Amino acid sequence: MSKRIDIYLVLSILFVGILLISNIAAVKLIQAGPFILDGGAFLFPFSYILCDIITEIFGFKKAQKSIILGFILSALASLIFLLVQISPSAEGWNNQESFVNILGFVPKIVTASLSAYFIGQMLNSYILIKIKTKTGEKKLWLRLIGSTFLGEIADTAIFCTIAFYGTISGAEFTNYILVGYIYKCLLEIVLLPITYKIIKTLKKHYM
């Protein structure tokens, strides 16, 4: 197995792992002063950075495979949580209500995540490649930031609407969407030097 395939597998595993963890963490809404975020905010934005790296180095088709794999495993996780939830509890096990309150909400979160993630990540990857066809190897910052900004618009709006519309009030809902989107985009910008270094290193040693 070549080094090129090795690093692709590592990046794909990290990408899918971040998605699965974020789906569960997103169950909780967090109040940070006047701002509202969900628990997925800690980790999920890194999935866009990883998708950028995979697309930039390995191309759109490889990125598609990673995105589809994440979609399939997220759907599987949702199904398993649902099956566990509806299965009869063992005698003496008294945590059914707690389980339902936390992981019982995961199927809704995953439905939101699957829809938002698939559209957002595909859009992100597609736009990055389209910009690259125009700029070549130049202006990496433009395709990294531009693709994320557009992909995150779709991702954030779809996820927030499916997962929490009606659960929180109108003003809080607007706050949730705007804060989530701005936070994810700012994180992409702040981490841009690190993303640059990772891409440069991987291109040098694995291409």
Image (spheres, rainbow, N blue to C red):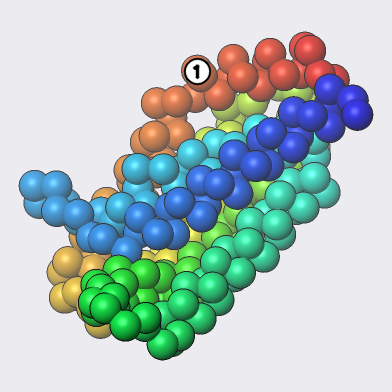
Residue 146 at x, y = what percent? 55, 40
Residue 149 at x, y = what percent? 49, 46
User: Which of 152/82 is in front?
Assistant: 82
SS of the residue under disc 1: helix
Residue 188 at x, y = what percent? 45, 34
Q: In which quarter of the image is residue 140?
A: top right
The kind of residue on which mark 1 rests is Pro
User: Which of 121/98 is in front?
Assistant: 98
Identified at 51% across, 55% down, the residue is 20
Count residues near mark 1 (Cα–Cα under 10 Å), then give few for <14, some for 14-19, many for 20+.
few
- The single residue placed furthest to the left in the displayed view is 33
- Relative to residue 149, is residue 105 drawn left or right? left
Tell me the quadrant of the picture where the N terminus can be found. top right
Report the residue marked by disc 1. Answer: 193
Tell me the quadrant of the picture where the C terminus can be found. top right
User: Which of 59/174 is in front?
Assistant: 59
- The single residue placed furthest to the front in the displayed view is 91
* Residue 108 shows in the view: yes
Identified at 10% across, 51% down, the residue is 34
Residue 121 at x, y = what percent? 61, 54
- The single residue placed furthest to the right in the displayed view is 1
Identified at 32% across, 64% down, the residue is 27
- Relative to residue 95, is residue 192 drawn left or right? right
